[in-house]
Image: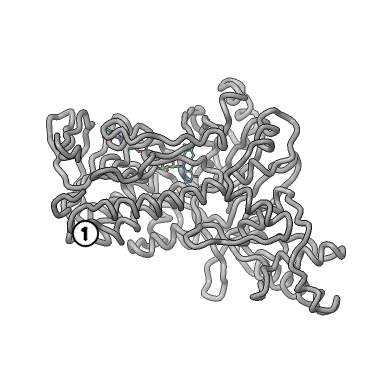
Amino acid sequence: MRMNMVKKVVIVGGGTAGWCAAAGLSRLLGPMLDITLVESADIGIIGVGEATIPTIRAFHTLISVDEQAFMRATNATFKTGIAFENWARDGDRYFHSFGTIGKSPWMAPFHNIWLEARSQGFGGSLDDYSLETKAGLAGKFQLHKNLPINYAYHFDAVLYGKYLRSLSEASGVKRIEGDVTSVRQNPETGFITAVTLASGAVVEGDLFIDCTGFRGLLIEQTLKTGWEDWSHWLPTDRALAVQTRADTPVTPYTKAAAHGEGWRWRIQLQNRVGNGMIYSSAYLSDDEAEARLRGLLDEPMLNEPRIIKYGAGRRKAFWNKNCIAMGLASSFVEPLESTSIHLFQRGVLHLVQNFPFFGITDAQVDHYNDVSSKELEYARDFVILHYKLNERTDSAFWKDRAAMSVPDDLQARIDLFRETATAYQGPGELFRVDSWAQVMLGQRLEPRGWHRLAGLMTRQEMDGVFDGLKKTVDHTVAQMMPHDTFVKQYCPTTAA
Ligand code: FAD
């Protein structure tokens, strides 16, 4: 497969994925490309997707986003991790932090030393050794050159799109508002040649990026790429989203609290809170879910709950002919670990690194699809882990999740951790060893053994290590500002 030089890029869709693609391509390859983005005001965007992970900062650095300007424009707050409530058992709480836990010698990660201490009745909680956990739970945040804190953001998805649009247009992206009503293809190759709008306008291109959301207008409706269904592992298929007032100081972390048939999120911005309920319609009706959500909200609602239907899975190819699907058009893994925005930002950067300047080749398409599939599957498996390792007995939903078989790679990781406390981050994988350890331990996976490097220390030396690490974290958190005080100084909202 080969076609002519690629210069004209047409992005269809102006949600977060569309504007990330536009901003990435225009800010990194701009002068060499001719980029048009088509979006429909009538269809609008999904308007959720407000929690991120630290990799977003690398994307922003590459496309020269000014952090303070971006945060002011999007009502953003800082996020140091995710607090999981009721996941293994009702009443449990653990924190998946973005930072490192304790100090890891080369021989084995810190959680091995902590497991040894715990077996001897000391060492406290793993949380005591994580700056991001302790700062998050204390409602503290600050940026300072001597403060090694890892973080991401919560922001308003609609305003983030607008912000990226302003960057993209300043870098030469042409924006056309209108509904795409038909798609033209080369009759011999099937390659897309143009999209036609309701106005009759025709937008031609060499490469098309499908960011049309769940409908997958180009990748599926036109190219019939096919869908791989993952609902047997991730059966939730509904979200109810609602905004509430922000009456309390910001919690600088995402809350993910399990309920009888799924979980709910709470994401606090500068001016409001985003709330949502994730559930499976096979186990809970929409009416029951809505009643449950209303009963669980902490603050008064600013709008009525809105239902979003979805399915877990992915297109059989992300890149098919001269069309690349990004965002919801390409795949969906529920937002438990806030991975979607990360995944399409990776897709944008991967495209920038492998741009088909001289024409599209099979090898290039295969490589892109292979890398993107693996990255998505790693994220998927990490999310499945939370469900698989539950001990809840209150509903068929949770019992079925604990009983399900999981992908082989994931089962092997679970077995390895159960036997030896070994967690690893393979090449190209998103989640760090500390992420796997925090979630596995938080989900009550009890290792039968661990690396006994702590046996090289006396009890007194171990006490010294734990004490020193804990004191450093506590001292640092005590010095930090309340999150809201810092945000008011650093990036107070300018958004309406
Ligand atoms: P959309 O926002 O749906 O945009 C589609 C675009 O295509 C729109 O501009 C629309 O107008 C346009 N379009 C469609 N058809 C046509 C047409 N015929 N002609 C012209 N234009 C058209 N991700 C995270 O990283 N963190 C989270 O916390 C998170 N939470 C989520 C919660 C829920 C409940 C869901 C469902 C998803 C969540 N996600 C999250 C995922 C995240 O919302 C999406 O990945 C992100 O918003 C990207 O969406 P999109 O741009 O692909 O699609």
- Label 1 crowd (10 A; few <14 / some 14-19 / many >=20): some
Which of the pair 26/408 is nearer the observer? 408
Q: Amino acid at mark 1?
A: Gly
Q: Tell me where residue 241 appears, x and y as whole percent.
A: 51, 33
The answer to which of 376 and 249 lies nearer the viewer is: 376
Where is residue 63, by image quadrant?
bottom left
Give the percent coordinates (x, y) of residue 490.
47, 62
Q: Is residue 452 above or below residue 93?
A: below
**Residue 402 visible in this rendered orientation of the protein:** yes
Whether residue 463 sits left or right of residue 157 in the image: it is right
In the displayed structure, does residue 339 sit left or right of residue 300? left
Q: Image quadrant of ligand 1? A: top left
Give the residue pinned by disc 1.
Answer: 30
Q: Please tell me which residue is depicted at 76% across the width and 60% down the height of the picture.
A: 125
Q: Position of residue 190 (x, y in %)?
A: 19, 37
Q: Secondary structure at mark 1?
A: helix
Residue at the (63%, 48%) spot, across then down: 411
Of 430 and 122, the residue lying toward us? 430
Task: Please say if 316 is above or below 133.
Answer: above
Q: Which residue is drawn at the image coordinates 41% and 38% (left, top)?
A: 47
